[in-house]
Amino acid sequence: MSASTTPSSRPAVTEREAREVAEAAREQHWRKPSFAKELFLGRFRLDLIHPHPLPADEAAQRGEEFLAKLRDFVETKVDGALIEREARIPDDVIDGLKELGAFGMKIDTKYGGLGLTQVYYNKALSLAGSACPAIGVLLSAHQSIGVPQPLKLFGTQEQKERFLPRCARTDISAFLLTEPDVGSDPARLATTAVPEGDDYVLDGVKLWTTNGVVADLLVVMARVPKSEGHKGGITAFVVETNSPGVTVENRNAFMGLRGIENGVTRFHQVRVPAANRVGEEGQGLKIALTTLNTGRLSLPASCVAAGKWCLKIAREWSAAREQWGKPVAHHEAVGSKISFIAATTFALEAVTDLASQMADEDRNDIRIEGALAKLYASEMAWTMADELVQIRGGRGFETAESLRARGERGVPAEQLLRDLRINRIFEGSTEIMHLLIAREAVDAHLSVAGDLIDPEKSLGDKAKAGANAGVFYAKWLPKLVAGPGRLPTSYGEFKHEVDLSGHLRYVERTSRKLARSTFYAMSRWQGRMESKQGFLGRIVDIGAELFAMSAACVRAELLRGQGDHGREAYQLADVFCRQSRIRIEELFTRLWTNTDDLDRKVVKGVLSGTYEWLERGIVDPSGEGPWIADATPGPSRKENVHRPIR
């Protein structure tokens, strides 16, 4: 093995090189329409989501039948309090889920799976996760990002026939990308897969391997060195966990989701057959990102379940608890929180179901919709849980076990808050999601004018880009001046006892305002735009609110047409849209009125020690040790805590 390909050589990359790796991994073209992409460009394409798409009757029947079986199982076999107390899902529960087919929900029936649609898969995750969030994570990590989804999209027929039947019934899978010193910057990925004959030899350490402690099969991202006959690059492999040299060194413990089997896995000279490589060399990140386009939708599903439970507890508690002569729900300070929870839960379910059905139909490119759903749901669900704790007061801060011990209903509100907190980090933190979505949202601009703001492009390239940009903007900018949002009769089909047409006109007008703001910012900052993360985050948050408003209105009209609580759905959509509009206007104000520049100055001072005096007067309870654990490749010195469930 040459020095240039030794596992111990962690790639040293510049900021530009890191961006180039990420850029190469993203899908470069838009082959299908995207509602959210059009929204960011100032074009409100309601026709892409209305009438609301629906699953086929056969798919709905199959899904409902499984939901009935799953409900019976979680109601009779799952003890969420026991899992929280013992920090482990009992083996018999996992075995029962396997027998039920829950590990094969998204796997095609020809491979032994249930073949559920994305819509019903998410409904199942919501149901299972409401009984115990750790079970929802177990099932989604296995199917949304574990072995089944990458093989479904990129696997060979031989790989599908070998692995999918196992994943459908017996084997648990996990996805391994993160490393102790590598999170959202995959250019620095250090785990290597060196070609040797008909095999690849893996060396490296992976961190936060959800399901990794109990997994039988792993999807591992590793860097293949470039050599003769090998393109090289970050590549995906299916690895058997019982292979020699694979050691699960630690089962991690967290503030929430105590039942998840998340660990640290070390690979030392692990031989993986070339037949286990998924896709081509260098396609690993593209596979990961493409998998996450729909994989991320499992997270909003859990947030929907959380919102529904928050609403149930808020309703029951606020009607029973009296303060100053009347139930606390009738005090405006509490009532406004209940209204927020109800309206937001309706909107989150609308966003999740719409994005999921769009994924099932495969008529639209949903890379932005899926990312927006994950971003918005994780932030709003956390806020709802926080509001529930506030409504419950001291009982919200008290554990369910303590409440039961003194004779009251054991409501795990504080557990929900702890369990939900990771959603703002899982599968792309809020900050990373802002940047990822912003990149996709401005893709049309970069496609025509990117060379203009690239300092490394030649004058000839810039001149050509300038000509192309002139043609594009001459056609695009005039369309941002006026639209149907200015006509009082637009979207009249949404006007009934409660009028939602005004909210859709607002979305149309505001999408054009959003596009104008983005264009102005690009003109003002040009190449520095990518460093304006505060601005980009607010742009994305406005787009998320507009997407949620659209989904809520379309869902309300669907339910009205079906005669399924349509009047109440319109009321909830109306309240949500009014709340959302307030948030949007605040975000627009903060686009240009903020402390971003001052914040950067303070940060420089903090890091240079200028304000170190402010830290005096405390003791630091942190233990000794490095900030980041040593991940030098080599043989494991720890006991293997891998615990396969059979």
Image: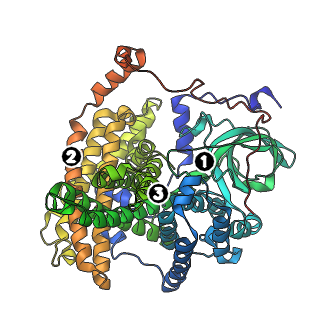
Q: Is residue 111 visible?
A: yes
Is 525 left, or right, of 644 in this rendering?
Answer: left
Residue at the limit of the structure toward the right, as seen here: 197
Q: Which residue is mark 3?
A: 367
Residue, disc 1: 285
Q: Say what amino acid the circle numbered 3 marks.
A: Arg
Toward the viewer: 501 or 314? Answer: 314
The quadrant in which residue 554 appears is bottom left
State yes or no: discs 3 and 1 in contact (Cβ < 8 Å): no
Say above or below: 429 vs 410.
above
At which x and y percent is residue 484?
Answer: 19, 65
| Helix, strand or loop at mark 2 | helix
Quarter of the picture containing the N terminus is top right
Q: Earlier in the sequence, mark 2 or mark 3?
A: 3
Residue 586: mark in rendering: 2
Question: Residue 115's mark?
Answer: none
Q: Where, by quadrant of the figure, is residue 100 drawn?
A: bottom right
Farthest residue, direction left: 488
Instruction: Report how far apart the C-alphas of labels 3 and 1 lie in the structure.
Output: 15 Å
